[in-house]
Image (spheres, grey):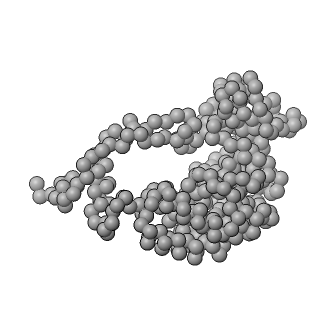
Amino acid sequence: MPLEFTYRAASEELPAPLPTIKEIEASIRLPRRFPGSPTVYLLRPHFIIKRGNRVKPIESENMLFVRKHSDLGVPKLYAAFRDTETDKNYLIMEYIAGESVSRCWATLDQATKEAVVADLRKGLDQLRSIKSPGYFGNIKGQNLFRPDGKDSSVIKTAYEWTEDLLESGQQEAPVRPRRFEWFRRMYHEILDGVSDPAKAVFTHADLHMENILLREGDRKPFVIDWERAGFYPPYFEYQTTMLEERFATDWGTHVDTFLDPYPDQMFVIFHWRAWALFGSFCEPPGYESEPSQYDMSYWLDHLDDKDYGSAIEESEDEAPVVTNYPERPRPTEVADILEQLGLDDK
């Protein structure tokens, strides 16, 4: 089976011969973390394998880069290749037996938590001390991973960075011109002063609790999923880490220990995600007057929808897509709204 390798560790570095495609597909297939994510296989006791169209070669290069420039725990990379027959990419990595921080943090004693945080701080500081290449983008000087999951071209000025966020938000969920100009003033005022590409720092860009594993025994932290890594503004790591924080434990209070906090910039990016990803400020075309019952009636349209499940189509390497939103008449009278809510006098 023809394989195109972009990386292959020396034989003396391997704990065992590299598995074949057949051996990989016969191994344990782990549950997907979310729809559309790459397939992950576990081949005990040595290998963990990521496979799929969404496995990017840049992830393997980032892993090698981080292991070279820091003491941060990162699984060893054994091979990266493409199967030319199926056009799927593979990463074969070291299997780290342990648990994610999200699963075990609440069970750790204070001394162990402090040791984990100190280890993370040391490794992340080493990465953040790498000299900036003078742009926001990945280590190859190519695309930048935006917070909406889409690629953007390399950015070389603070103004470009902020405008890229603004333009992508307006493209995804258009708002009135006056509202957009207010967004623009707010974003530039808060972001530009700390978004100089000359001071870009190397960033994981997805450093949430699920992506930090604590090894069995010594509880050393290992960071996984490096596909989004690159050079970003100094605050970017903090906002991506806090974005996924649910405050079910005291993990959030420890984030400020291994990352410098940037609360103002964090809330701007949170605002941007609510706008660009979820349309929180979106207005319908031609809607000129101030919103009244529009927002309520929009959600009421979908209260009784029964066929969302059947409307979702999912393939192995693609995120689910809603293909047929049910159409329902929008209530236009207060009485109709009250009736649907069960608050009418009947």
Instruction: Give 181 or 193, whichever is nearer the viewer.
Output: 181
Residue drawn at x 53%, y 68% as measured from the top left: 267
Figure quadrant of residue 207: bottom right
User: x, y percentage for residue 244?
Assistant: 55, 57
Q: Nearer the viewer, residue 105 or 11?
A: 11
Q: Residue furthest left?
A: 346
Q: How many marks?
A: 0
Task: Look at the picture and state if 85 lies above or below 135.
Answer: above
Q: In the image, is 186 to the left or to the right of 75?
A: left
Instruction: Locate the C terminus and report the quarter of the image it occupies.
Output: bottom left
**17 vs 173: above or below:** above
Quick check: can you spot residue 321?
A: yes
- Tell which residue pokes out farthest to the front in this image: 286
Q: Residue 182: x, y in percent?
A: 48, 73
Percent coordinates x, y for residue 174 in the rendering: 45, 60
Q: Is residue 124 visible?
A: no
Q: Quadrant of the N terminus?
A: top right
Position of 249 with respect to 79 (left or right) is left
State the residue at coordinates (60%, 60%).
240
The answer to which of 274 and 72 lies nearer the viewer is 274
Residue 112 point in image, percent of width and height: 68, 59
* Residue located at (70% from left, 70% from top): 196
- Which image quadrant is residue 93 in? top right
Q: Residue at x 71, y 67 (%)?
A: 197
